[in-house]
Amino acid sequence: MRASNILVFVISALTLSSCSGRKFPPGFKFGAATAAYQVEGAWNVSDKSPSIWDTFTHDHPEQILDGSNGDVACDSYHLWEQDIQLAKDLGLHFYRFSLSWPRLLPNGFANHISEDGSRYYNNLIDGLIANGIEPMITLFHWDLPQNLQDLGGMTNPLIAEWFGAYSRVAYTLFGDRVKTWSTFNEPLAICDVAYEGGKLAPGIASPETGIYLCAKNLMIAHATSYRIYNEEFRAKYNGKVGIVNHHVWFTPYSSEYEELTHLTRDLGFLYSHPIYSETGGWPPSVEAFVASKSEKEGYSTSRLPKFTAEEIEFVKGTADYYGFNYYTSRLVREANNSTVFAWPSNGNAELNVELIPDPNWDAGLDWLVSYPPGIRAQLNLIREYYGNVEIIITENGFSTSTDELDDVTRTQYFRDHLEQVLLANTEDGVNVTGYTAWSLIDNYEWNSGYTSRFGIVRVDFTDPLRSRTPRASAEYYADVIRHHSL
Ligand code: PNW
C-alpha cells in the first residue's frame, strides 16, 4: 500500500468510528434483558406457588427439546448479585427483567404478598440502582400463577381484574424506584403461539377461539393496569408504562402476494392497533377477515370478540412508549399442502399463509434467520402506522447451539442490527430511544430448554454454581456502550 493510500485508509477508518453518523443520539439508552422463569430457578422456595411453566415442564417434558425445566435455571434467585455485576461491567444503562407473579403473590390474588418475593425484588432493584443501572420491569413474561390458570387464566375475562390488582401491588412496592414498566411481554406468544397448538404453557390448543378470547382479555388487562398507574401512581412517580410487542418483518414472496402481506402485517399489529391507532379497536382488515370466516364456519358471532365502544376508548392510548422485540424476517406467500402452520415463523392457518426465509439471509439456529434491514423496515412501519411514537427495542438477539466464548456470529448479528437501528434513528428520524440485547445470560429457552443459547454471557449449566463468563459479544457490546457509537 502506498503512503498516500495508507493515509486515506487511516482517515476513513477514523471517520467511520468517530463521525457523528456512527454515534447514537445523546439520550439513547442501552440495556439487556432476561425473564423470571428463564433465569430465577428456585421454583418452590418459601411460599412461591407454581406457575403454568412449572406445571407444563413438569407434566410435559416431551414438549421440551432436552426434557428440561426452569427449576434451577441460572439460579438468579440466589446469584442476582453476580447478574448485577455483569450488567455493571457491561456499562448497561438499564436491565430489563420480569417479576414472577406467583413469587410475589402466591395465591395469584392480592390478599397475600409474599415477604420473600418482595424482599427478592427489592434487593435486585436496590442493587441495580446502587450500581447506576435503571431497573425496567416486565410484569408478565408468561409465568401465570397455576391457580389462576385453573380458573381459566387468560381466557377468563376476570384476568383483567386479577392482573390489575397484581399490577397495583407491584407499582406500590417498587414504583418509587422503577420508572419504566411493561405489562405483557409478547401477547403474540401468550395468546397466538400458546393457544395455536398448545406447545407453550398452559398447553391448551384452541386455535379458533382460545387465541382470540386471550387476545381481547389481554388488551383489557393491559389497559386496566395502565389506568391504575395513571390514576394512582403517575402523579407521584412519573414513570412510563407500555406493552412489548413481537414483530417479524414481512415482505411479499413475489408481487402477487402484496395484499396477503398487508393482511399478515396487520395480524402482527393485532395488539398494537387497539392502543396506538387513532380509531382504536382491532386492525379493521383482520376484524373483517375473521368475522367473515367465522360466519362461513357457522359461528353466530365472530371468533375475534368485538370491543364495545366503551372498551375501545378504555384501551386506546394506554401506552407511554412502544416496546418492540425483533429477531427475524420472512417472505409471505399463499400456503400449500406442505405448509406447517406455526405463527409467526412458519405459517398462519387463519390467513392460510406460508412464511419462509429468503435463501440469501444468514441462517441461524432453527427459526432465527438474520436479516438486519428488517428491524429498520419494521421501525419505519410502526411509525407509518402510528406516527412518531417513542419506540424502545426491548429485545434483539441471536442464538447458537454451542456454548463457545468467541461468538463470532452473535457479535456480527448485534453489529448489523445496531447499525440498522442507528440508521432508523439518524437517517429516517424514527423516534427509537433505547436498545435491549437478549439476553444478558444464557437461560432456559422455553421449548428448546438449554439447547439454544442467547446469552452475551455464557452460563455453565453443568456447574452447580452456574458460573458466568462473558463472551466476545459482551466485550463488543460494552465497547458500543462506552463509546456510544458503532
Ligand atoms: C422472545 N418467533 O420470544 C421472548 O420474549 C423471550 O423470552 C425468548 O427467550 C426470546 O424471544 C428468544 O426466543 C419469541 O416466533 C417468540 O419468531 C416468538 C418468536 C421469537 C421469539
Image (cartoon, rainbow, N blue to C red):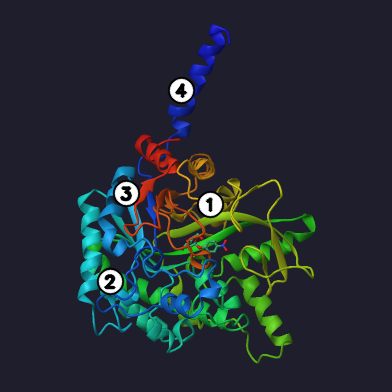
Is the CB atom of the residue marked by disc 1 within 8 angstroms of ligand 1's nearest atom?
A: no
Q: Residues within 10 Å of mark 3 (few under 14, many from 20)?
A: many
Q: Earlier in the sequence, mark 2 or mark 3?
A: 3
Name the residue that disc number 2 marks. Answer: 170
Residue at the spot of label 1: 400
Please name the residue shown 20% across and 68% down the image: 119
Give residue 193's position: percent from left, percent from top. 56, 72
Measure the C-alpha gap from mark 1 to mark 4: 32 Å
Q: Say which amino acid is labelled 3.
A: Ala
Dots 2 and 3: beta carbons under 8 Å? Answer: no
Marks 3/1: CA–CA distance: 21 Å
Depth check: give the residue in front, 87 or 57. Answer: 57
Q: First in sequence, mark 4 or 3: give its number.
A: 4
Which of the marked residues, 1 or 4, is nearer the chain's N terminus?
4
Percent position of residue 462, x then y? 40, 58
Eyeballing the image, is 473 above or below 144?
above
Write down the quadrant of residue 230 in the picture. bottom left
- Image quarter where the C terminus lies is top left
Query: Can you identify the residue that label 4 sits on?
Result: 14
Numbered tag placed on residue 87 in the rendering = 3
Query: What's the residue type where badge 4 is placed?
Result: Leu
Front position among marks 1 and 4: 1
The residue carrying pointer 2 sits among few (fewer than 14), some (14 to 19) or many (20 or more) residues within 10 Å by Cα, namely: many
Q: State the residue at coordinates (25%, 72%).
A: 117
- x%, y% of residue 476? 43, 38
